[in-house]
Amino acid sequence: MARAAAARLVTAVADAQAARGHASVVLTGGRNGNGLLAALAESPARDAVDWARLDLWWGDERYLPAGDPERNVTQARRALLDAVPVDPTRVHAMPASDGPHGDDVEAAAAAYAQELALAAGDGAAVPEFDVLMLGVGPDTHVASLFPGLPGVRETERTVVAVREAPKPPPVRVSLTLPAIRAARQVWLLAAGEDKAEAASTVLGGGVDPADAPAAGVHGRESTLWLLDAAAASKL
Ligand SMILES: O=C1O[C@H](COP(=O)(O)O)[C@@H](O)[C@H](O)[C@H]1O
């Protein structure tokens, strides 16, 4: 799944760059997201991407000090970004807990929302993401929108602070459903037996996104589930 998704990402980014001169991708953390990045790092096809004309954003972040090994951006750097010629000014990491906002995760979320709006221009709230990837948690969470927590019900803001996440660390920053739904393509990544129940619940239909956040996401042009056989075993 990681290799297939990495190949698909190269094509999507190269197509966007050919059509518009640049591309914008939202990365996900977690096992599946990092697996995709590692597969891309190993693939000769990575040279088809013009890394200097690619903006990278994150769907969520664990609110920890910069460089913490549990931060999604740290893991993405190790898996791929340290090995490719990205433009550092286009790598839009979410704020860290030892940054200007300190313990104020709400201020950190607001700052990322402002960064998104500035990049978007023209009064839009978020840039035109070409591809937005989301790892699907075994509990159906996507980004850091967890079942039963208020973030998944947000309808106005593009970025929210998350407290008391059931998966450590408890304090996080996350894009919201409206921000996610603004992307051209939304890809949901699910590999492994522990994702089978979540995939079956969401793809079975009829669930409330407040209970199963993955059920609330879609792209403007396409919504794609990328599953391996184990994750698809209960469909
Ligand atoms: O904590 C997180 O978990 C989800 C899912 O991760 P996985 O390891 O179960 O694939 C991930 O999408 C999110 O970015 C991350 O912060």
Image (cartoon, grey):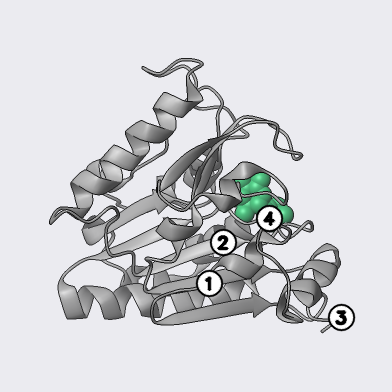
> Along the polypeptide, which appears first: circle 2 or circle 1?
2
Residue 95 appears in the rendering: no
Label 3 lies in ligand 1 vicinity (Cβ under 8 Å): no
Query: Distance between the Cα atoms at labels 2 and 4?
Result: 9 Å
Q: What number is the disc on residue 134?
A: 2
Mark 1 residue type: Trp
Vertical position of residue 200 compared to residue 194: above or below: below
The C terminus: image quadrant: bottom right
Q: Secondary structure at mark 1?
A: strand
| CB atoms of marks 4 and 3 within 8 Å | no
Q: Position of residue 53 (x, y in %)?
A: 21, 60
Q: Which mark is drawn over residue 141?
A: 4
Image x and y of residue 21, in percent: 15, 70
- Residue 88 versus residue 120 in the image, above or below: above
Say what secondary structure mark 4 lies in.
Answer: loop
- Does label 3 or label 2 sit earlier along the sequence? 2
Asked whether mark 4 lies closer than 8 Å to ligand 1, one says yes
Report the Cα–Cα distance between label 3 and label 2. 20 Å
- The residue under label 3 is 234
Mark closer to the observer (4, 3): 4
Instruction: Please state if 88 lies on the left or on the right of 108 as rendered.
Output: left
- As helix, strand or loop, the secondary structure at mark 3 comes to loop
How far apart in space, not on screen, are marks 3 and 1 (Cα)? Answer: 20 Å
Q: Name above or below for residue 110 compared with residue 174.
A: above
Q: Amino acid at mark 2?
A: Leu
Mark sitting earlier along the chain (3/1)? 1
Mark 4 nearby-residue class (10 Å; few <14, some 14–19, many ≥20): many
Measuring from the top left, give residue 161's x and y in whole percent. Answer: 52, 34
- Which residue corresponds to the image point at 22% horizontal and 56% vertical from the top-left? 124
Q: Gap between marks 4 and 1, in whole Å?
A: 14 Å
Q: Which residue is mark 1?
A: 187
Q: Does ligand 1 reach within 8 Å of label 2's beta carbon?
A: yes
